Image (cartoon, grey):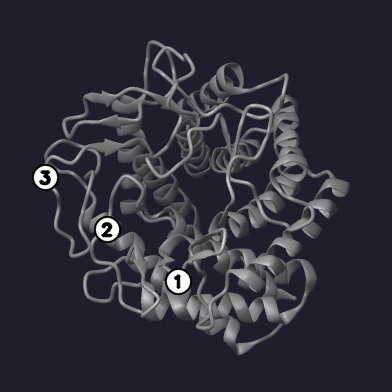
Amino acid sequence: MKDARLKEIRRRLCGELDRIISWWGKHSVDQQYGGFHGRILFDNTVVAGAPKGIILNSRILWSFSAVYRFTPQPELRDLAHRSFEYLVQFFYDREYGGFYWQLDPQGRPIETRKQIYAQAFALYGLAEYVQAFQSEDALNLAQSVYRDIEQYSRDHDRRGYFEGYDSHWNLLADLRLSERDANEKKTMNTHLHILEAYTNLYRTAPDDQLGSALNELIRIFLDQIIDPASSHCGLFFDENWTLRSETISFGHEIEAAWLLCEAAEAIGVSELTGEVRKVAVKIADRTLKEGLAADGSLFYEQTGAVLNTDRHWWPQAEAMVGFMNAFEITGEKHYLEVAFGLWDFIEQKIVNREYGEWYWSVRADGKPNTRDDKLGFWKAPYHNSRGCLEMIRRLDRADAL
């Protein structure tokens, strides 16, 4: 599909990807204690004494490795190596396996619980690092993490994966990722990120057992998590897959739509891929109807009749890719227009032009949120750099048609 806009938007995406990664290369490195800072405010102020979290550091590993694969540069290589080495030296539990939740600034464990969500992100980053640098050590560690998830977390009787464990792999009483989450044994969020991690590991080192586990994860989404009537995803479940939440997370749903397609395509079962693609388009249609604001951005979430109209940074990036994915499946150009509208909103409202990188969120009145972090436990270069990378690749495919 030859279209001058494709090249123009690709150029802008490449420029923003470069700005994102340049910001992280310049501001995130902790020269005093090693690794990367634990927290930076919206105006690039480093918060002294901030702890360091596994989610941030796993996502940093993925991001520098992924962008290096796209555009190999010595500084990206060095940052990816720095991230891998810090993760292995400080976050990894050499005695019992798995990755700790949080360290103090000096790299000493202060929260040793092992959330499966976090193990999945570590696996996701490690697999990307292997693809970038062909590291046997990283591959061995990635496969060890995969085995730990399967051994300790998988529920073979009722399907799926349990949420969290202590350092000795005993199931926790408090399973929540954060205070805003429900304390339930199974969640859509954790299953989504196991799915993306297993997909990336399968691309790196295909294996029949891994492929079977990935196939089962896709079926869990189709059979348990996605409501066939509404195309919404349940967020929190008990061990028997009884739904325990009424919240709709627009960002998670549209992210799941394209990640499920990636997973099905990776294992190469044509019937499953066809089924997943149909579901992905239904999710895109529902998101378009209920979650898209008049200005082309994506609302955060809805609980009952209460709509949270904040526009967080990461759902904008995921929705952009999710609607581009729907366009690729169907060829219907209105999905492409929605993806481009999201990109326009990101450029105009989410990118922090003064200090670099992206704001955490923008309110309904268009004013940016300057309270929350630029870099922090949950704020990393993963969603925005991945959004740019995915859009660039997909625009290249569209332009080749």
Mark 2 or 1: in front is 2
In this rendering, does residue 396 appear at all?
A: no
Amino acid at dot 1: Cys
Residue matched to label 2: 372
Q: Earlier in the sequence, mark 1 or mark 3?
A: 1
Secondary structure under badge 3? loop
Amino acid carrying label 3: it is Ala
Q: Earlier in the sequence, mark 2 or mark 3?
A: 3
In the image, taking residue 244 as reference, residue 110 lies left or right, namely left
Query: Residue 55 location in percent, x, y?
Result: 39, 40
- Check disc 2: other Cα within 10 Å, few if <14, some if 14-19, many if 20+: some
Residue for point 57% across, 58% down: 304
Residue type highlighted by circle 2: Asp
Residue under pointer 3: 48
**Residue found 61% across the figure and 28% down from its top:** 161
The one nearer the camera, 238 or 395, is: 238
